[in-house]
Amino acid sequence: MRQLTLAALLLAAPASAAVPVSAVNTQADAVEAKVIDWRRDIHQHPELGNREVRTAALVAKHLRALGYEVREKVGVTGVVGILKGGKPGGVVALRADMDALPVKEATGLPFASQATGTYNGATVPVAHACGHDAHVAMLMGAAEVLAKLKADIPGTVVLVFQPAEEGPPAGEAGGASLMLKEGVFNAPKPQAIFGLHVWPGVAGSLSWRPGAMMAEADTVHITLKGVQTHGAVPWRGTDLIGQVATTVHEVNRLVTRTIDPTQTPTILTMSAINAGLRHNIIPDKAEIFGTMRSFDLARRDQLKEQLEKMVKGIAAVYGTEATVDISSAGALTYNEPALATWLSGPLAEATGSVDQIHPDAPPVTVSEDVSLFMNKVGGVYYFLGISPDGVAAGETPPNHSPFFTVNEKALKTGVKAHVLSAIRFLEQQPKRERPAS
Ligand SMILES: [Zn+2]
Ligand SMILES: [Zn+2]
């Protein structure tokens, strides 16, 4: 009886057999040259947020040719591709962002950007200084590999090509929040989403961490109102300029004096001041702008309260009025812990070596709007190392630098990481936890 059951299991095995990693490797080898070509083409033709028209058309055409169901203009220029595998199963999503930045490229690459665009009404140079060109190319490569392996995939893969990750132009909606509003996950709804960002590190290495991975970003806007007076008779008005200096000085002390640095990294930076016009007029209005970065949302809420209390306390001393607006500019990127642990398997397969994966990397203080997708369905976001050969991560020009570039050797690993995270998720249906929010 026992043997019969075993025989039945063995007979059933081919239907549920995993896609061999060798098949993924073969297809990734076959697509590598195309991925490099796409990346260079997109790099040479960068487009700012919500203006990714050429890039989106390239993606949609490629997905259609591969037999994907394609939805366009989801969140202005977003493209969604849906691939139904040959076997029944769940749904998983993969994400790439498409937008470039108002940066003048200084890499000296033969395919460096010469492009310009319009940003806040001004003509600006435009470049892929955050590597989203590589993101699009790798997910296009993954689309092709997945299409080739389609017959053996148990479930559905949703590819999300997202516009405006760096933020939409002033006065426009965009990015992950708009794609969600416009139903990117409505049908089919993914059970989880995975994605990657190119980042300084050994080319082709993959790093991530469970839990809080990229910061919650909050924008701080302080407005101070007093009584204007001549600089020669300060006692006839309020000393708003002195108050600005005191406020910046005290706010800068707040984090170091109130947060346990061994518990949670926190940044509070005052970055801009608008106040005054002339040497002999003390103005009646001043504004201070800043940014907060946190990894612990409860602690962030406390810090917001402390900041407001401090600013208003100082205003009371100076006899002025203060308002403090703190608004979220990017949600915490939270890797669902159980999934983050599980992902070591597929990502070790993608790199071909456990030495090339780092599942306990430190968090980073930048923020990413992939967090909004992850908050909806849970998932994991990870970094793909792209440093030039022989250049340490700390010596590599960072993302957003005019010298930022991507080591193309890493692209094939990125393709495999996308493909294996999706296929193994569908095959193995790993145990889940509740995501952060
Ligand atoms: Zn960026
Ligand atoms: Zn980016």
Image: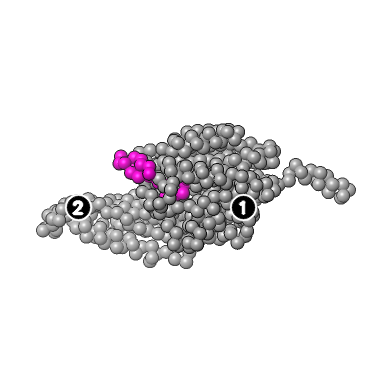
Residue in front for this viewpoint, 351 or 327: 351
Circle 1/circle 2 CB separation < 8 Å: no
Look at the numbered disc 2 and give the secondary structure of its residue: loop
- Whichever of callouts 1 and 2 sits on the residue coming sooner in the sequence is 2
**Does residue 127 show up magenta in the picture?**
yes
At label 1, counting other C-alpha atoms closer than 10 Å, the crowd grade (few under 14, some 14-19, many 20 or more) is many
Residue 398: x and y in percent read 43, 56
Instruction: Describe residue 114's horizontal placement relative to residue 236 as left or right.
Output: right
Q: CA distance from mark 1 to mark 2?
A: 57 Å
Q: Position of residue 156 (x, y in %)?
A: 63, 39
* Residue 211 in sight in this render: no
Q: Amino acid at mark 2?
A: Gly
Colouring style: one colour
On the question of residue 2 being in view, the answer is: yes
Q: Which of the two residues, 421 or 65, is positioned nearer the viewer here?
A: 65
For mark 1, what is the residue?
Answer: 350
Q: Position of residue 339 (x, y in %)?
A: 60, 52
Q: Which residues are magenta?
A: 114-133
Q: How many marks?
A: 2
**Residue at 58% in and 41% down:** 143
Q: Residue at x 43, y 41 (%)?
A: 45
| Residue that appears at 32% across and 55% down | 271
User: What residue would you read off at disc 2?
Assistant: 276
Q: Residues within 10 Å of mark 2 (few under 14, many from 20)?
A: some
Q: Please, which residue is most extreme toward the left here?
A: 232
Q: Between tags 1 and 2, which lies in front?
A: 1
Front-lying residue, 51 or 301: 51
Question: Which residue type carries mark 1?
Answer: Ala
Where is residue 96? Give x, y as percent: 51, 44
